[in-house]
């Protein structure tokens, strides 16, 4: 009996013909259909073919994974995120580890392309845990769908129109200024966003005052019993109108039984949910992976310096910190109100060791350090990583 070894090749930058075949595979694997994936890429003006990876088996395209480059805020700083999506394998080639081979190759590539962290949204956790992604649960609130109508009958609530896109962009920028975990969206991103399939599966309502848009909210368009608020932002002057806008969005979903929100703790709608006796639960979808430890902290340096300067326990101190995560060290030297971050320590200097595993480190960066201890190490971690009102909007999902 003769056996033949199949040739597996992992590549990036598919030709258009190869990309069409990848769309075919994704359309066959996922119920949303082929057009969902094709439109997401065809209407992305920043799309770079190098972000599409695929595996061939004896010259047949069998599996693919897409990297969606995103930049998220961490206070005044920003990090480059490799958002992993469109993971699909032809059923005839499953069990060969093709997607894992692609993900490992993409990890190496992202390290060389200045990515800091990687985010993956999934429900099949063990599959991705095998190649280094780990679950970090995120908080959600749910209430029974309100049946009350907006209290201000004269409030001008109107449906979205592309003519208001610049208004939405301005509100988004003001509302999310320095808000950790939010995606930095330029004008092209906004123009693309309203063409993507996720946007088409939403309803967007706006609050207009004196011919000026002052708030907007987005709710998913679905016939499910449980519906998510996808995005919600307002100018500070219009915070009092937020609940009425939310109630108007709920009226668009009369069949829904539960409304879910993953908006930040300081959001007016989060406060409203709590006032209504919301149920709190953790959603296990987001999976994270550390890509480049040194790059991450280099980019965070201005934000970390500002945090140390304004913290009462650290502002006037001299600090030398050895932040140790996995097998990597980063040295933080804070002196005369200035922070230096390096891979090398200062000779003849005593460093305070801060041992943080990868999962803890990502939690601290995105949501802040919230452990209830009062030791010197805890105070330092609280200064470096204070609680963040972090939000990742569904509109940016991939």
Image (tube, helix red, strand yellow):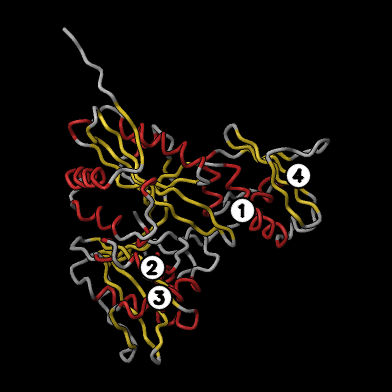
Tag 4–tag 1 contact (CB < 8 Å): no
Of circles 4 and 2, the one toward us is: 2
Mark 4 or 1, nearer chain start: 1
Q: How far from the left and from the top, in percent, is residue 176?
A: 49, 68
Residue wearing tag 2:
190
User: Which numbered dot is residue 320?
Assistant: 4
Mark 4 or 2, nearer chain start: 2
Mark 1 or 2, nearer chain start: 2
Q: Find numbered disc 1 in the image and state the secondary structure of the residue it sits on.
A: helix
Q: Residues within 10 Å of mark 4 (few under 14, many from 20)?
A: many
- Residue at point 25%, 18% (across, down): 5
- Along the line of sight, which residue is nearer the eye, 282 or 27? 27
Q: Find numbered disc 4 in the image and state the secondary structure of the residue it sits on.
A: strand
- Residue at point 40%, 49% (across, down): 83
Q: CA distance from mark 3 to mark 1?
A: 28 Å
Residue wearing tag 1:
300
Of circles 1 and 2, the one toward us is: 2
- Residue at point 29%, 83% (across, down): 158
- Along the line of sight, which residue is nearer the eye, 44 or 391? 44
């Amino acid at each position: 009996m003769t056996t033949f070894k199949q040739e597996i090749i992992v590549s990036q930058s598919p030709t258009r013909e190869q990309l069409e075949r990848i769309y075919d595979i994704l359309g066959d694997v996922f119920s949303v259909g082929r057009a969902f994936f094709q439109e997401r890429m065809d209407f992305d003006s920043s799309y770079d073919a190098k972000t599409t990876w695929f595996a061939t088996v004896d010259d047949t395209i069998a599996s693919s994974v897409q990297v969606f480059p995103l930049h998220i805020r961490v206070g005044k700083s920003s990090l480059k995120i490799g958002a992993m999506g469109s993971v699909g394998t032809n059923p005839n080639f499953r069990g060969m580890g093709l997607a894992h081979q692609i993900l490992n190759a993409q990890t190496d590539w992202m390290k060389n392309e200045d990515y800091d962290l990687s985010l993956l949204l999934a429900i099949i956790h063990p599959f991705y845990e095998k190649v280094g992604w780990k679950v970090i649960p995120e908080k959600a609130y749910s209430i029974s769908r309100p049946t009350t109508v907006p209290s201000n009958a004269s409030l001008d609530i109107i449906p979205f129109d592309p003519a208001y896109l610049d208004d939405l962009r301005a509100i988004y920028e003001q509302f999310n200024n320095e808000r950790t975990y939010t995606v930095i969206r330029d004008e092209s991103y906004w123009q693309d966003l309203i063409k993507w399939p996720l946007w088409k599966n939403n309803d967007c309502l706006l609050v207009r005052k004196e011919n000026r848009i002052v708030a907007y909210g987005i709710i998913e368009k679905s016939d499910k019993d449980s519906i998510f608020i996808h995005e919600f932002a307002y100018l500070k002057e219009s915070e009092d109108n937020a609940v009425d806008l939310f109630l108007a969005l709920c009226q668009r979903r009369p069949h829904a039984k539960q409304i879910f929100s993953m908006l930040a703790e300081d959001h007016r709608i989060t406060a409203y949910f709590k006032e209504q006796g919301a149920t709190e639960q953790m959603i296990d979808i987001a999976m994270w992976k550390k890509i480049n430890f040194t790059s991450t902290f280099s980019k965070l340096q201005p934000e970390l310096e500002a945090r140390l300067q304004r913290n009462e326990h650290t502002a006037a101190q001299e600090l030398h910190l050895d932040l140790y995560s996995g097998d990597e060290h980063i040295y933080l030297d804070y002196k005369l109100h200035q922070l230096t971050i390096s891979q090398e320590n200062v000779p003849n200097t005593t460093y305070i060791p801060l041992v943080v595993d990868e999962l803890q480190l990502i939690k601290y960066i995105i949501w802040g350090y919230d452990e209830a201890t009062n030791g010197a190490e805890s105070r330092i971690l609280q200064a470096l990583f204070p609680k963040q009102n972090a939000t990742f909007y569904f509109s940016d999902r991939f």
